Amino acid sequence: MAGVVQGSCKMLPSRLRLPSIFRLSRSAATTTCAASKVDPPNIAHLCEKARLTLSPEEVKDFEPQIGRIVDWFAQLQEIDLTDVPPAIRVGEIDPTKTLRPDTPKTFADREAMLASAPDRDGPFLKVPKIMKENQE
Amino acid sequence: MASWRCLGLARGVGASILFREAAALGGLKWKRTGMATATAAGAPRVTSCLHSAASSARREARPAATRVMTKESGGGAVTTTEYEAVIGIETHVQLGTTTKAFCSCPSQYGSEPNANVCPVCMGLPGALPVLNEVVVESGVKLGLALQADIALKSKFDRKQYFYPDLPKGYQISQFDIPIAEKGFIDVDLPVEFGGGHRRFGVTRVHMEEDAGKLIHAGNDRLSGSSSSQVDLNRAGVPLLEVVSEPEMRTGLEAAEYAAELQRMVRYLGISNGNMQEGSMRCDVNISIRPMGREQFGTKVEIKNMNSFSAMQKAIEFEIDRQIALLEEGDKIKQETRLWEEGSQRTISMRSKEGLADYRYFPEPDLPEVILSQEYIDTTRANLPELPDAKRRRYESLGLSMQDTLVLANDVDVAAFFDEVLAKGADVKQAANWIMGDMAAHLKNIKMTITEAKLTPASLAELISLIKDGTISGKIAKEILPELIEKGGSAKEAVESKGLSQISDTATIESMVDKILADNMKQVEAYRGGKTKLQGFFVGQAMKASGGRVNPGLLNKILMAKLNG
C-alpha cells in the first residue's frame, strides 16, 4: 500500500527516505509535495518491495484494480491542508495508560508457537541460507 | 570494569608506576593506556594495551585533521592537496531493561536460543505491542544528558525490510519525530594526544527495537550449508539510536565521541555499553574533501568495529584509502565496508547505489509517546552527575587532567573515588591509591573495583593512618592486598598484625644501640669515613622492626648516635 502512493507525501511519510546523517532534510522532503497528482502505481516496483512474483498477465490484471484504489484515495489530495498541523493520530490518548511496567512475563505457549514455524534446527528456527551481501 | 583486567604493561619503578597503573585503570580506552614516547620523527607514539586483548600494538597519533598528499606534476613542480575527513557516527545502544521494548519477554543476554519469545516479538498476526516505560525513561535520560530538546509528543513508525532476523517484516522505530533532537557531547581529548576540548553535535536520539540473530553455521562459503539458524531472543530488545552531526574530523575525535557516549550511558545506568558483546554498536560514515571545500564527498559507511581502538584505526585506514583513490583519479563508491580486525583493513560489504526504500509509515499499533513537562523536569532533577561535570569537578579539586580522565573514565571507579573523598580522605592521596596500588592488585587478581572487599571507608582510614604517622606508606602497601581480598577495617588490620609504626624515641634508641653494638666493625668503618654505610644501619633497623620504624625519627637518632 505504502508504495502505491509514491508521490503523495501529504498522506504518507513512507516516500521519505531514511535521511542519511549527512543530510537530515525533513523540510526539504516536505517541500516536494507541491505536485498533488498521485502517480500511477508501478506494479513491478511494488512486487519487488513486497517480494511477490507476478506473471505479466497478473500484472495486467492488477494494474487497473490497484490504480482505482489509488485514485479513490487520491481524492484526499484535493483537501486544502494549508495551516493544518499534521495529526499523528485521531482522538485523545490518556498518556498514563499507554505504557507498561518493565516486569518480565514468560509466554506460556512458546513451544506451540515455535512448532508452527516451517522448519526448525534444534532450538533455532531454520531458514534458507542468507547471503551476507543481502544484510540490512 | 574490564579496565581492571587490562593492564598489559610490566610494572615499572618510581614515578612511572603510578602512570602505568593509572593507565591500567583507564584500560577500557586504549588512549589512556599507553606511555607516550617520542619517535625519531618527533610524533608522539603510544604503546597501548588494547581492551581485553592486552596487545602491545603501537599506535600513532595522527598529527592533525588533515593528511597531505604531494604529487609531482609534469614539469617537476609539486602540487599539494590537503584533505579533510568528515565523520558522522550512528550508535545503537542496547538498553539494560528487564524486558523487551514492546512485550514482556525477558531481554537478558545469554539465554537458550528462542527462550524469550512471544507472539509480539515473533510478529504473529493480531499481537499488539505495548511500550516499556523504562525505554521512554532511558530515552529521556539520554536526551537530557545530551542537552537535547525532548519531544513532548513523539511517535513510532514502521521501517520495512525483509530479512529472516526480522519476523514482522518491519522494525518499529521512530522516523520523523524522534524522542530527542539537537544535543551535543563534550569531550576532553587524551593528554597524550595533546589534550583539548571538543563539542560534537548530536542530531537525534530515537527509540527502536533490535532484530534477532542469524547464525550462519560453519564457514558459509566452504561448508556449502544451505540453511541459516535464527535466534529471536534479541528481537524486540530496546535500542536507542544516537545520530551525530558530521562534525568529527579524525579517528581520534570519533573514538572519543563514542567513548564519551559509552561513559554517558554507563553513568546514567541505562546500558552496559559493552562493545564486544554488541550492546553498543557504532556505524561510522566517512567522506573526505579537499580542505576548504564546503561540499561533502561521497560517503562510505564502516561497520563491525568492536572497540574504540578498532574504530580509530578503521577511520584512519579509510581516510588513507579514500585519499589514495582520489589521487589516482578514481571515484569513491558509496558503499558499506566492514572493518576486518585480522587484516587491519576495511573490506567492501555491499555497494549502496540506490538508497534503501524502507517505506516508513506511522506504526498504527502504538499510540504516540506523550510526555509531560513535569515528567521531564523530574527526570532531569534526578539525573546523576555526568562524566563531563565529574571531570570539571575533579579538575577543580586540583587533580591533573591525566588523573581526572582516568578516574572519571569508569563510573564504578569514579563512584569509589567519590566515596573515599566523602570519608574525608586527601584528594591526591585517594587518587594515587586508587589508580596505583589498588588498580595494580585488582588487575593481578582479576577482580573489578565493585567486586573488591575493600570499602571506600576502609581506604580512607588507611590513608589517614599514613597521614597521622600510625603506619608508613610501605606498611600500607603491604596490607592493601589483604584488605582488597578480605575486607575489614584498615585500623583493625594494622592493630591485629602489630604493624603500627614505631614512633617512640626510647624504643628506637634502644633498637639503634643494639644494632650499633652488634655491628661494631661497620660503625668503625663509618666513623672512618665510609658514610655510605648509613644505609646499612637503616636497613638493619627496618629489618629488626619489620619495616615499622618511623623513618624520619630513625634517621635522626641514628645520625646522632653514629656521629655523636
Image: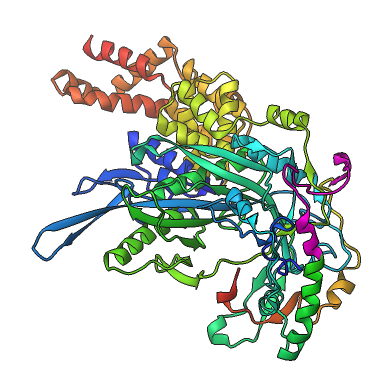
Residue B370 lies in the magenta stretch:
no
- The location of residue B400, given as percent across then percent down, is 40, 28
Of residues B420 and B524, the one nearer the viewer is B420
Q: Quadrant of residue B382?
A: top right
Residue drawn at x 43%, y 38% is B22
Residue A93 lies in the magenta stretch:
yes
Residue drawn at x 40%, y 58% is B297
Residue situated furthest left in the rendering:
B75
Of residues B127 and A81, the one nearer the viewer is A81
Of residues B371 and B231, the one nearer the viewer is B371
Of residues B453 and B364, the one nearer the viewer is B364
- The location of residue B300, given as percent across then percent down, is 45, 62
Q: Is residue B376 left or right of residue B47?
A: right
Q: Is residue B125 above or below residue B50?
A: below
Segment colored magenta: A73-99
- The location of residue B471, given as percent across then percent down, is 48, 22
Q: Quadrant of the C terminus of chain B?
A: top left
Q: Work out whether residue B417 can be spotted.
A: yes
Q: Is residue B267 left or right of residue B102?
A: left
Q: Work out whether residue B485 can be spotted.
A: no
Q: Is residue B437 above or below residue B164?
A: above
Q: Is residue A102 above or below residue B482?
A: below
What color scheme is it?
rainbow
Q: Is residue B15 left or right of residue B478?
A: left
Residue drawn at x 50%, y 34% is B407
